[in-house]
Amino acid sequence: MVAEKLVGQPLKRKEDPRLITGAGNFLDDIKLTGMTHAYVVRSPFGHARITSIDTSRARAMPGVVGVFTGEDLAAVNPLPCAWPAAGGENNMNTPRVLALGEVHQVGDPVAVVVAETRYQAKDAAELVDISYEELGTVVDAYKATLDGAPQLHENAPNNVAVRWTCGKDADEVSAALAASDVRISQHIVNQRLIPTSMEPRGSIGRYDEGTGDYTLWATSQAPHVHRLLITAFILGIPEQKLRVISPDIGGGFGQKIFCYFDMPLVLWLSKAVGRPVKFFEDRSENYLSAAHGRDHITDVEIGASRDGKITALKVDTYANLGAYLSTVAPGIPTTLYGRMVAGCYKIPAIHVNVTGVYTNTAMVDAYRGAGRPEATFLIERVCDLVAQETGVDPAEVRRRNFIQPADFPYDTGIGMLPYDSGDYEKALDKALWNSSYADLRAEQARRRAKGNRKLLGIGLSSYVEVCGIAPSKYMGAQGWGAGLWESANVRIHLTGKVVVTTGSLPHGQGHETSFAQLVGDELGVPFDDIEVEWGDTLGTPFGFGTYGSRSLTVGGTAIYKSTAKIREKARLLAAHMLEANPEDVIWQDGKFQVKGSPESSKTMQEVALAAHVAYDLPEGMEPTLEATTFYDPPNCTFPFGTHICVVEVDADTGEIDLLRYVAVDDVGNVVNPLIVDGQVHGGIAQGLAQALFEGAVYSDNGELMTGTMNDYAIPKASQLPVYELDRTVTPSPVNPMGVKGAGEAGTIASTPCVANAVIDALAHLGVRHIDMPITPEKVWRATSAR
Amino acid sequence: MGIPVPMATRIPVRITVNGVEYAAEVEPRLLLVHFLRDNLGLTGTHVGCDTSQCGACTVYLNGQSIKSCTVLAVQANGGEVTTIEGLAVGNDYDPVQQGFWEMHGLQCGYCTPGMIMSSHALLDRNPNPSEEEIRHALEGNLCRCTGYQNIVKAVQRAAELRAGK
Ligand code: FES
Ligand code: FES
């Protein structure tokens, strides 16, 4: 009997039973004996000098264990930035654990109260008396670079944190623009977003006086990386003296990749007070001080031919990086944005200029998609602008500029690794077909001809993104401060049960399930006999964690390679057990069989038992079945697809109705379609919300006006459409499973798709662009101005 | 945060949670969600915001679904609370839990307990809701992972399971 393959099946998730019964173990669920609670006193000012701090009243409050300020932590290093922009100018300033002397954003941590209960810590925090002398503030990335703007850091004149370029020489591209028949320029703002995983961030520190060991529980997408950064760069303790544990994580979307002040703080505090210390932020603290995303101001100049071919692209972007550099901040608007602006298109002349800027706002770093959503938004708006200017249909503009299947591996010429594989036209055609595109255009024309006040808009977005970010050598050349491989250990126990430990770090993606599916097939072990372990530096080999849709492509491949090593060793042992020639023993139908005599076979479990008891092993073979792999891929993977959104816009009120959302994604081979579809759904929702609802807003003096969920528009069930999903499958040649990654595609595709749809509805009125979020008010203003 | 209140003020409460009666002396300002999580160790009920938006803290109080971050423990005095931990009977999941599992109605699982409690309350009121009714009924529960489509399907599936289908 041929066992049915697990890979490709929409299996129910292994992780769900604990999560649907309330038995998950999230950070704030953890209670340690003697645990105290930290509450942080934060700056109410966007920019100020701290003139005095008096903690005496707070110290006298009931339950208070200690009160500490930046002075107490003066010997602790600032947080590191691990990804300066390679080849550019980097004027690095990173935050201190607690501010010392000056604050640069509302929410900067200034003091901390440790008390018996969280309520007591909060009460006492009210009584920490801090005097400030206010300084000037600037929150806009462009304005911050102008002469006379308030200066945040001494080493960053005009608040410039990063200067970086890629592509062809600026003059060469200017010449190509000048030689183009069609020229368009557009100012485009990609607004600031707040990631908003439903679980905020937090950490618990425990110092063991007896051993001198520290343990950190943290809402972390990358516990090994955090251990490295905290020990080697911040606290200056030996790496092996810290254990970092990520429990169940309630969503991350990038925000939990970074190293935050509270991580070293709770460790330091635990040593200082001699008890474990928990910090768990309120939602409004999360909004104030955990990393935000996007926030670009871009001027783009486009050259095109009359038939819609893009001939030149000149991009000038101001990227707001906030008050300091977050852990990987400079890499996002450079490598992951600048080098991806070509999208799916062959564009002969591109120049990108990026200025990363300090402002009196929260730090900005990777948020779901990280650079690629900004790049895709730009190039997909460019396609529609070209369509509008030339009169060529938007679908046709894309088709005419696509990189063709025969062109792969394809080098866009702007410093990205070569795109691995793709068939962009196939995905486009499928999306056009699934949406009945021609009928939609006909209906749009009819409505326009009749002067119908319900305007129909059709938006397209053909995207390509880069996933499984690696190889280490490339990333090192891009300024990344470490490798970017992934680890996996797979072992089969005596009883035939399998334990997989991975350096990946699931926080909603269902790795326990997908990884078990792939291991089950490779080792011939039932799905329920496989346990995937993760998230503890004590139990897993060094790994880089989960972000950049790298878990299956890099982490999964490491697992796959470990299973292959085990299978080969087990095959040799099986041959020994069957008294057959190793060359004659093959893996077939989930068993080791002697070629030609299938009745002579051994199961993996039988071999595992023999390997463990080790009574009779072939000469020189070590006991047990176990393998570890550190996998550094030869290239990234490049998922792609086309999304189409249909909207109805009320010309009188500006109200936008989402009629349809059609997505065709190509993420390579699919391990669990249920999980992949879920990733796409959630991604679309987040990207769509950027187009229509979300935006972080600061007042000029640096106050976050969207500081709670009351003001920041996380979409609700009633605001979102039904997603009509479909796929094409173009396996990636980069890894043996042919997978490409699916975590970010939806977010990357949907923002320009929805924005294009709304603008398309108004195109015949002469509207060319509206900045996001495209609210009814903005639509109404754009139309009533005509 | 507000003005510190004298810590000495403690009020006795008796609250029945998942069928078990608990007696405690609590500060008047103690939120029901913190009573459940910190005093009783029922950490299935989550906190996702500080402005009553997210619904991660949804539980039943006296037969009604409420946001337990918006109710004081003292207000629940004498009341009956059901939390996510009280939904399954033995090893049998509640149909709503089953629906969420089958339809992949959760990813990170942080919103899930609140989502399940709200969906449960919806099905109590309306055993056969339309898609629009489901989306409307869940407006007080935010999910950042799923984009809601599979949550809608999960509730539809739960409705079927409750009807014995
Ligand atoms: S915790 Fe968000 S509504 Fe209660
Ligand atoms: S499943 Fe993560 S917030 Fe809903």
Image (spheres, coloured by chain):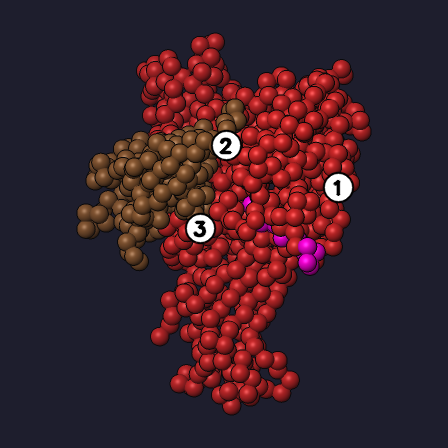
**Residue at the image point whose x is 48% and y is 9% from the top:** A785
Pointers 3 and 1 in contact (CB under 8 A)? no
Labels 2 & 1 near each other (Cβ < 8 A): no
State whether residue A597 is above or below residue B67: below
Q: Provide the secondary structure element on which disc 3 rests.
A: loop
Instruction: Give the mark nearest the N terminus, 3 or 1.
Output: 3
Q: Chain of mark 2?
A: B
Q: Nearer the viewer, mark 3 or mark 2?
A: 2
The residue at the far top in this view is: A785
Which residue bears the numbered disc 1?
A: A76
The chain shown in red is which?
A
Q: Is residue B108 left or right of residue B60?
A: right
Above or below, A358 relative to B34: above
Specify the amino acid type for callout 1.
Answer: Val
Residue linked to disc 2: B7
Chain B's shade in the image? brown
Q: Which residue lies most toward the right here?
A: A155
Which stretch is magenta? A209-224
